[in-house]
Image (cartoon, rainbow, N blue to C red):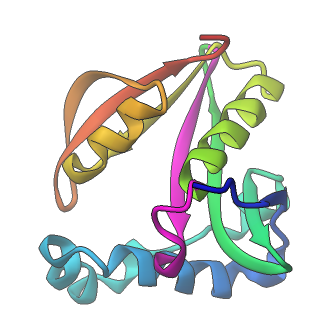
Amino acid sequence: MTEPNVTFRYGHAAEAGPLEELQRRASLEWEEYRADLLANPDAIQLPLSQLTEKLVRVAEMDGRTVGFSVVVPKPGGVSDLDGLFVEPAYWGKGIGRKLIADAIELARRQSASSLEVVGNPRARGFYERCGFVEFGIIATRFGPGIQMRHRIGE
């Protein structure tokens, strides 16, 4: 597979709506979550503060937004991968993996020793291939979430 030429930049406040729509398209791809997401449209929100505080990284190919991540610093030297979404037409092209690498670098710049994520069970394999290790299960609004951690520098 040819590596995609992906560039990264910080998101801008004016992009909140388009990024939420990208998140909605990606999230609605999975049948098991569709009804809950359609019944709870407020579940897809990108807080403006995450954009203004430079916590959102946008992935682009040929000037087109193809995905984004949100990395939020937490106390105790941890950063939280609060969101990772790729435009469905670009799934399977390595963009998610590149977003993870960029998120790890952002967490490093936030002085984190680890990056944590709560993923849905369907995403477990993806996160494991990216170096995350499961450390727990947590109840979420839409069912169990898998708590995973990637140590920075590993």
User: Where 149 falls versus 125 (above or below)?
Assistant: above
Question: Residue 136, image x and y in percent?
Answer: 23, 24
* Tag count: 0
Q: Magenta includes 135? A: no
Question: Residue 134, image x and y in percent?
Answer: 29, 23
Q: Judge from the rendering whether residue 130 lies leftward or rightward of residue 147; answer left or right.
A: right
Residue at the front extreme, as displayed: 1
User: Where 55 falls versus 90 (above or below)?
Assistant: above
Question: Residue 50, image x and y in percent?
Answer: 71, 58
Q: Quadrant of residue 141?
A: bottom left
Query: Which residue is rendered at x = 55% and y = 62% of the image?
Result: 93
Question: Residue 65, image x and y in percent?
Answer: 72, 77
Part of the protein shown in magenta: 77-94
Q: Quadrant of residue 26?
A: bottom left
Q: Judge from the rendering whether residue 26 lies leftward or rightward of residue 99; answer left or right.
A: left
User: Where 99 falls versus 66 (above or below)?
Assistant: above
Query: Which residue is rendered at x = 67% and y = 37% of the image?
Result: 101
Quarter of the image that includes the C terminus: top right
| Front residue of 62 and 79 | 62
Quarter of the image that includes the N terminus: bottom right
| Front residue of 139 and 101 | 101
Q: Magenta includes 93? A: yes
Q: Judge from the rendering whether residue 29 lies leftward or rightward of residue 47; answer left or right.
A: left
